[in-house]
Image: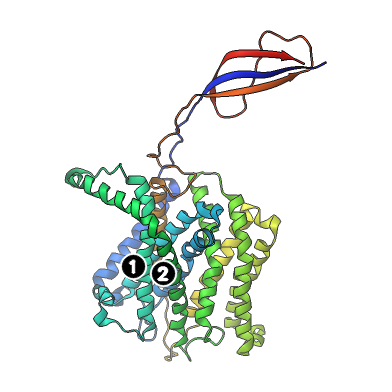
Amino acid sequence: MSAAIPITFFRYTPVTRAESRPRYFTPGVWVVAAFAAIGAVAWIYRMLFGLGAATNLNNAYPWGIWIGIDVATGVALAAGGFTTAFLAHILHREQYHPLVRPALLTAMLGYTFVALGVMTDLGRFWAMWHVMLPTMWQPNSVLFEVAICVMCYLSVLYIEFLPAVCERFVGRVNLPGPARVLNRHVDRALRFADATLGRFMTIFIILGIMLSCMHQSSLGTLMVITEGKLNAFWHTPALPALFLLSAFAVGYPMVIFESIIAHRSFGLRGESDLLSRLARFIPFTLGVYFTAKITDLAVRGQLPHLLDRGTYSRLLLSELLVGVVFPFIIFASRPLRSRTAWLFVGSACVIAGVVLNRLNVFLFAYSPLDRSAVYSPSLSEVAVTIGAVAMTVLIYRGIAINLPVIEQLEPPHAPHRASVPREVSVAIQNPVTSMPPTAHVEWCGPSVTATATTQTWSYT
């Protein structure tokens, strides 16, 4: 004979604990800040004393790592913004929404420093604003198209990120000092933006995707005109399409790479399940790029030359094996892509492959007509490039801590969940017929303060 205690009523109040906020400065952050400071000093030196004093550029090599890394590579690695927006908003894969804002922030900062990289490499940087004047437009120039698209897309990125700013500051604008007289006006502007942006956000998302595709491919078009200077492995009329496809291929790996590093840095539980599902798309994008690359080499008769033991064949094989074949194997395997370590390794390989591809096209495989000319980056060029990367990391960390970007990292201003009393019913099965007058129930769940209000016993 069995006895049942079907209902025991408890009234409890959840105990909400304030999660400790991550500190901005850690030993690692101090190291990154030191690199950023050195880069800032080198950048100021270049701006004050010119390209001749700060770089090893010459007439044969009019650009160096500031274009090859800061611009061409930076644009490619910022592709996670538009590829993730396309997946979540255009294809309506709602489960990937937690990845959109971090990817958008990475793209926004990446393109910001791409613009700074272009300005740094210009001899007359003070005239950069001329590109906005219709009287100075040159529609036959590939560089003009890249400049316009990057400028417009950067504006779109800031607009797309504005809802996070509104979410943080609407009703909480508190400017210091004399600027406090603007609090009401700023708050009113943020409320207006918050109320209206949602109606037009789809238009900006579509516009951002279109602009990204245009300038990603145009960077390849820029190098099509270097016939006789760029090695035949990379010089091809298909270069614009290959640049665009490689940007698609690196988009999701960059999102995974950034997510793993950010969560580890903040001491948060990773999003391995979500990232593993996202990684299912990577073999497709890598496969499309690899097929297009091999087909182009075969059509142009360059495929047999991969067996040559020259420098360029080694560079191309490294680019394909490290950046495409090896990560394809990782992401195509369900057991491997379900583990965070392999996700990180695979993403890092794709990123390394794209970086090597851009360096091959813009630097390593580029030979000017003056064969006697040489180029090696100066210390100030290296310092500015490393400093830009370090500054991007610092700004990302500051924004992620203070704005609602990473879902697991609730900002300190976020309202705590209300401590609402709730009633819980617990049923206990007991195999004996004699019932004790009281029963002890152990609760497994959120921290609670429980009080037994009634006890009802029934027997079967």
Give the image quarter of residue 161.
bottom left
Residue 213, percent across and down? Answer: 47, 73
Disc ID at residue 175: none
Image quarter where the C terminus lies is: top right
Question: Alpha-carbon neighbours of circle 1 within 10 Å: few (<14), some, or many (≥20)?
Answer: some
Badge 2, how many Cα within 10 Å: few under 14, some, many 20+?
many
Q: Farthest right residue?
A: 1
Can residue 378 be seen at all in this image of the molecule? Answer: no
Q: Give x and y (percent) for residue 52.
A: 30, 77
| Image: 398 above or below 241 | above
SS of the residue under disc 1: helix
Task: Tell me the residue that label 1 is attached to.
Answer: 116
Residue 187 spot, x, y in % from top left: 27, 47
- Vertical order, 456 against 71 (above or below): above
Residue type at the position of mark 2: Asp
Contact (Cβ within 8 Å) of mark 2 with mark 1: yes
Q: Name the residue under label 2.
A: 70
* Picture colour scheme: rainbow
| Residue 328, x across and y down, in percent | 65, 66
Q: Is residue 117 left or right of residue 360?
A: left
